[in-house]
């Protein structure tokens, strides 16, 4: 019965976690189903493990804040999510849609060759109309005795590279930060108005 409740909570919470429009919306999950000793693992860097419920909460809060700060809108689409555990795990396949705002739009200009090949296009205001899409899997491992989530692992499949690797791949020259007022601005972008 406890496992069924935890699965129901995940079905309710996961799709709403990163839902935003205009910087508002979404909600934090019900942490009562998580173990105090939960581990969070990014499968692309399995040596980096976050341990403990307080760290997990801070990580999710920081991630949600980052998305609200950089993107006008975000939506987490669940493409596959079971109702039963397999080997004490619940797997979720998801697609996160992100619509950039402000300076993030300028950063995407650097990636325009790859973005266009992925189906993005710009409107008359030179804003990206199609969302940036991140696809992946989340696996929630349960303790069979307590029915608490003990491990949450994320495996991002698209884009297949770290963003820094993607920037290096499509950069035609090195980008150097140069002092500009109180900020360091990548060379070639000094024309932006960044004075506060």
Image: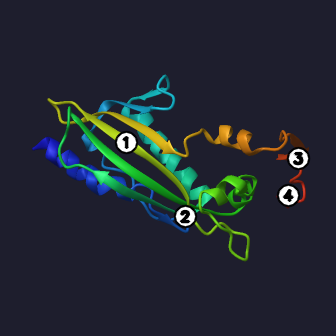
The residue carrying pointer 1 sits among few (fewer than 14), some (14 to 19) or many (20 or more) residues within 10 Å by Cα, namely many
**The C terminus: image quadrant:** bottom right
Quarter of the view holding residue 164: top right
Residue beneath disc 4 = 195
Q: Are marks 2 and 4 in contact (CB under 8 Å)?
A: no
Helix, strand or loop status at disc 2: loop
In the rendered structure, which disc, 2 or 1, sits on the residue that comes first in sequence?
A: 2
Of the numbered discs in the image, which one, if any, rests on residue 138?
A: 1
Image x and y of residue 192, in percent = 85, 60
**Residue beneath disc 3:** 187
**Marks 2 and 3 close (CB-CB < 8 Å):** no
Is residue 36 placed above or below 20 in the rendered structure?
Answer: above
Give me the C-alpha separation between circle 3 and circle 4: 16 Å
| SS for dot 1 | strand
Pointer 1 or 4: first along the chain: 1
- Please tell me whether residue 39 is drawn above or below residue 80 in the rendered image: above
At a point 72% along the width and 55% down the height, the residue shown is 113
Left or right, 136 with reference to 84: right
Mark earlier in primary sequence (3, 4)? 3
Nearer the camera: disc 2 or disc 3: 3
Q: CA distance from mark 1 to mark 4?
A: 41 Å
């Amino acid at each position: 019965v406890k496992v069924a409740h935890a699965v129901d909570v995940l079905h309710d919470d996961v799709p709403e976690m990163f839902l935003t429009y205009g910087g508002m919306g979404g909600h934090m999950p019900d942490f009562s189903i998580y173990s105090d000793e939960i581990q969070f693992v990014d499968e692309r860097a399995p040596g980096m493990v976050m341990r403990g419920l307080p760290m997990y909460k801070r990580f999710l809060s920081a991630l949600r804040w980052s998305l609200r700060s950089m993107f006008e809108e975000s939506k987490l689409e669940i493409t596959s999510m079971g109702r039963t555990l397999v080997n004490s795990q619940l797997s979720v396949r998801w697609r996160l849609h992100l619509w950039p705002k402000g300076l993030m739009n300028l950063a995407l200009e650097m990636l325009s060759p790859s973005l266009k090949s992925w189906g993005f296009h710009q409107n008359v205001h030179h804003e990206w109309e199609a969302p940036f899409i991140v696809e992946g899997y989340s696996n929630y491992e349960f303790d069979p005795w307590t029915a608490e989530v003990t491990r949450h692992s994320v495996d991002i499949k698209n884009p297949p590279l770290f963003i820094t690797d993607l920037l290096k791949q499509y950069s035609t020259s090195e980008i150097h930060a140069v002092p500009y007022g109180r900020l360091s601005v990548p060379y070639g972008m000094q024309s932006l108005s960044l004075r506060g």
